[in-house]
Amino acid sequence: GQNIDQPTEMTATEGAIVQINCTYQTSGFNGLFWYQQHAGEAPTFLSYNVLDGLEEKGRFSSFLSRSKGYSYLLLKELQMKDSASYLCAVVDSNYQLIWGAGTKLIIKP
Amino acid sequence: GAVVSQHPSWVICKSGTSVKIECRSLDFQATTMFWYRQFPKQSLMLMATSNEGSKATYEQGVEKDKFLINHASLTLSTLTVTSAHPEDSSFYICSASFGGRDVDEQFFGPGTRLTVL
């Protein structure tokens, strides 16, 4: 079967750094997406990784290791508005998007 | 760019009635549109994928006669929940992609919250 694992919930402090991990076992791999979803709203695109390594985009960075079936989303200089769920999604060999359950990130002052 | 709208934002209806949800790509032509359902504190569940001018492809376990999808143009797809029941209450989200590539970023609409009494 296909499986995406993420922590259910994480808590961090405003101004700090947090790393949200995602591990996957899928039939094939054609890339990994990270989306942000605020409560009651639709997801918004954060990043797409298909090659190994770290991609930085402002305060957010995303890392991928295909050999380990592992990715993480790194959020720096946390702000209260970063409180949201972060969804990891993998594109499998059929180019279908397999979604993780999401990680709820709580930011405390 | 790449804005997707949904209408209505929320709807409350009586059990047994049908509800239509519209999904529009406002500034691009969407070859492919996706319909998702999300229950509280759960991830997105893909219901169906639709390509303009052809029948939608439904995921296993999704009743095609209950969830009617029409993708009549490159900018509009509709989802009709027929004979809605309380268990159909959920957050329905559509997304759209440009298409033509193997891996496409999906642009999500703001979602429609359906409550069936």
Image (cartoon, coloured by chain):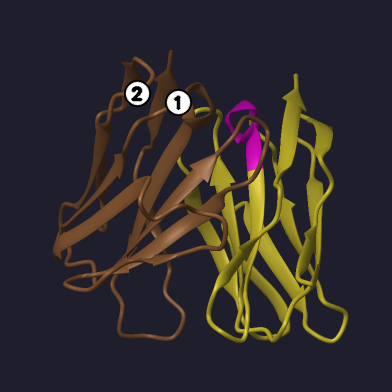
Colour displayed for chain B in the image of the structure: brown
Circles 2 and 1, Cβ within 8 Å, touching? The answer is yes
Residues indicated by labels 2 and 1 sit on the same polypeptide chain: yes
Front residue of this view, candidates B97 and B38: B38
Residue B107 painted magenta? no
Q: Chain of mark 2?
A: B
Rendered position, B44 above or below A94: above
- The structure residue drawn at horizontal position 27% and vertical position 31%, both measured from the top left corner, is B19
Label 1 environment density (alpha carbons within 10 Å; few <14, some 14–19, many ≥20): some
Label 2 environment density (alpha carbons within 10 Å; few <14, some 14–19, many ≥20): some
Hey, what amino acid is under mark 2?
Gly
Q: Position of residue A105 (x, y in %)?
A: 73, 35
Q: Position of residue B56 (x, y in %)?
A: 33, 66
Q: Position of residue B97 (x, y in %)?
A: 33, 67
Front residue of this view, candidates A12 and B113: B113
Question: Which chain comes out yellow in the rendered image?
Answer: A
Q: Chain of mark 1?
A: B
Where is mark 2, residue-wise? B16
- The structure residue drawn at horizontal position 43% and vertical position 68%, both measured from the top left corner, is B105
* Mark toward the start of the polypeptide (2 vs 1): 2
Q: Is residue A68 left or right of residue B26?
A: right
Q: Quadrant of residue A61?
A: bottom right
Hey, what amino acid is under mark 1?
His
- The structure residue drawn at horizontal position 79% and vertical position 72%, both measured from the top left corner, is A1
- The structure residue drawn at horizontal position 78% and vertical position 65%, both measured from the top left corner, is A3
Any mark on residue B72, and which? none
Q: Quadrant of residue B5?
A: top left
| Residue A41 visible here | no
Front residue of this view, candidates B88 and A69: B88
Any mark on residue B85, and which? 1
Span shown in magenta: A80-85
Rendered position, B20 above or below A59: above
